[in-house]
């Protein structure tokens, strides 16, 4: 059960103090009442409170001075002003002094209770935003990589182990999971960090140009080759070459790339001269390469050449504990970029993010927070600031755990494995990683369940 809201009331009207104390206690709140501002400030210096409610015309210290002192020394404490002189200048002066809300006398007790609830919720939200920001700072172990989940801790551990080596790395995972960020982290933590990091999207280069891009060409090698061009393998010399979407590399190029990687020498198209190069190779794919090999869409020898160390990246829906961390990280980023003072998420917006399936993974979350920061005019993001697909998203019914109470342990395990496999779109590499079992064990279980290995 949550602790009751704690309120400090300062007013020189003893009768009003009694009425407010009785009303707030009936509403389930804790309240301390005082008649003078210096006494209230002394109390707040030693005791925590969720909200301060104060009159302006107080003995010993004017209410404006009390507000200013509280804002300077206890900035997280919201202040609600009560006054019998409910004029616009008074309200403006109260807000300028740092007050959160303004109520006039004679007092509407129900309105005060609602104002106190809103103020204390805002204080709780600010505390949660501060906590998330601190956790985000602590979790940012690999530059742009953010996450504290067990799955990401395993990724970090693998990066730490292999970054200092020149071993070839294959990063696997769905689109949008951050494969290039992992590749950059490997480069930045390696002895090659002073060298170039060259990224190539194999899916975006036309098949008739891919050889020229990778290996370079001599002047006059083909019609448009008006001057010699250094290939990306040579450009990455003494650094890291990142081949993204390696599964999309045309079959005609694959044996040529294999030979170049084995010999560490490259001959540009149209040239008779071979030059040596020294690169650390990192590849990535969102496809299951074992299946592509079995289908004849990817060379087996090249697969074994690039699959020395494999780093499976989990999808975002398998690392739910990182959703709010990542959201806060992106909110901070886009607030700085857009010169906004957006600090965090309202509870309803945070709940919507936690329930969403995230088919686009971290990339989709990043875009959603860019949209939300741009649409938010205050300091906290609400549901109405999120993209339409998240505002209207309705998750399916929760799993009926009680209905599984009579199942055997083997059946519970079978259902769980198949749910995880389905959540990761049949990717057995990621599924085995999320489940914490090796792939041979997963394949054996799937065969027993009647799921073919290559499906």
Image (cartoon, rainbow, N blue to C red):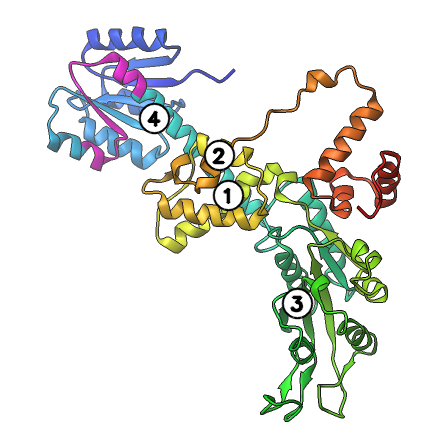
User: How far apart in space, not on screen, are marks 4 and 2 (Cα)?
Assistant: 19 Å
User: How far apart in space, not on screen, are marks 4 and 3 (Cα)?
Assistant: 53 Å
The answer to whether any part of residue 195 appears in the image is: yes
Q: Tag 3 or tag 2, which sits nearer the N-term?
A: 3
Which label belongs to residue 327?
A: 1
Q: Residues within 10 Å of mark 3 (few under 14, many from 20)?
A: many
Q: Tag 1 or tag 2, which sits nearer the N-term?
A: 1
Which label belongs to residue 350?
A: 2
Left or right of residue 367: residue 182: right
Say if mark 2 contacts mark 1, CB within 8 Å. yes
Q: On the image, numbered disc 3 is attached to which residue?
A: 202
Q: Residue at x 74, y 39 (%)?
A: 421
In the image, residue 396 lies at what x, y percent? 59, 28
Q: Residue at x 35, y 29 (%)?
A: 77
Vertical order, 67 against 242 (above or below): above
What range is drawn magenta here? 94-114
Vertical order, 405 against 308 (above or below): above
Left or right of residue 114: residue 432: right
Q: Residues within 10 Å of mark 4 (few under 14, many from 20)?
A: many
Q: Nearer the viewer, mark 2 or mark 3?
A: 3
Q: Tag 3 or tag 1, which sits nearer the N-term?
A: 3
Q: Residues within 10 Å of mark 1 (few under 14, many from 20)?
A: many
């Amino acid at each position: 059960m949550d602790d009751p809201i704690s309120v400090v009331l300062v007013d020189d009207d003893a009768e009003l103090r009694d009425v407010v104390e009785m009303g707030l206690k009936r509403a389930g709140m804790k309240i301390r009442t005082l008649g003078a501002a210096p006494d209230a400030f002394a109390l707040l210096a030693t005791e925590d409170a969720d909200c301060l409610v104060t009159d302006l015309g107080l003995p010993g210290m004017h209410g404006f001075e009390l507000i200013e002192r509280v804002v300077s020394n206890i900035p997280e404490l919201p202040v609600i002003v009560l006054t019998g002189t409910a004029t616009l200048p008074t309200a403006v002066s109260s807000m300028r002094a740092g007050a959160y809300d303004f109520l006039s006398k004679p007092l509407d007790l129900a309105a005060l209770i609602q104002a106190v609830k809103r103020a204390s919720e805002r204080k709780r939200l600010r505390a949660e935003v501060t906590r998330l920001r601190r956790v985000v700072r602590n979790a940012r172990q690999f530059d742009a990589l953010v996450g504290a989940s067990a799955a990401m801790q395993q990724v970090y551990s693998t990066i730490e182990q292999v970054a200092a080596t020149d071993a070839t790395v294959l990063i696997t995972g769905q689109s949008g999971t951050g494969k290039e960020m992992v590749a950059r982290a490997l480069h930045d933590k390696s002895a090659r960090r002073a060298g170039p990091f060259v990224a190539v999207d194999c899916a975006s280069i036309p098949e008739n140009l891919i050889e020229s891009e990778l290996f370079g060409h001599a002047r006059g090698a083909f019609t448009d080759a008006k001057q010699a061009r250094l290939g990306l393998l040579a450009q990455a010399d003494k650094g890291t070459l990142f081949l993204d979407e390696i599964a999309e590399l045309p079959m005609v190029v694959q044996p040529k790339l294999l030979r170049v990687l084995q010999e560490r020498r490259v001959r540009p198209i149209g040239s008779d001269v071979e030059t040596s190069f020294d690169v650390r190779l990192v590849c990535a794919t969102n496809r299951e390469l074992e299946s592509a090999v079995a289908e004849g869409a990817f060379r087996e020898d090249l697969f074994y050449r690039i699959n020395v160390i494999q780093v499976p990246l989990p999808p975002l829906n398998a690392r739910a504990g990182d959703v709010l961390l990542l959201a806060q990280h992106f909110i901070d980023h886009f607030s700085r970029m857009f010169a906004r003072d957006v600090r965090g998420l309202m509870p309803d917006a945070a709940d919507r993010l936690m329930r969403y399936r995230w088919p686009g993974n971290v990339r989709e979350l990043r875009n959603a927070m860019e949209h939300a920061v741009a649409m938010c005019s205050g300091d906290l993001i609400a549901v109405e600031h999120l993209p339409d697909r998240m505002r209207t998203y309705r998750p399916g019914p929760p799993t009926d755990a009680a209905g599984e109470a009579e199942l055997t342990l083997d059946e519970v395990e079978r259902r769980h494995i198949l749910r995880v496999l389905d959540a990761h779109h049949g990717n057995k590499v990621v599924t085995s990683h999320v489940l914490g079992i090796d792939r041979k064990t997963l394949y054996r279980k799937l065969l027993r369940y009647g799921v073919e290995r290559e499906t």
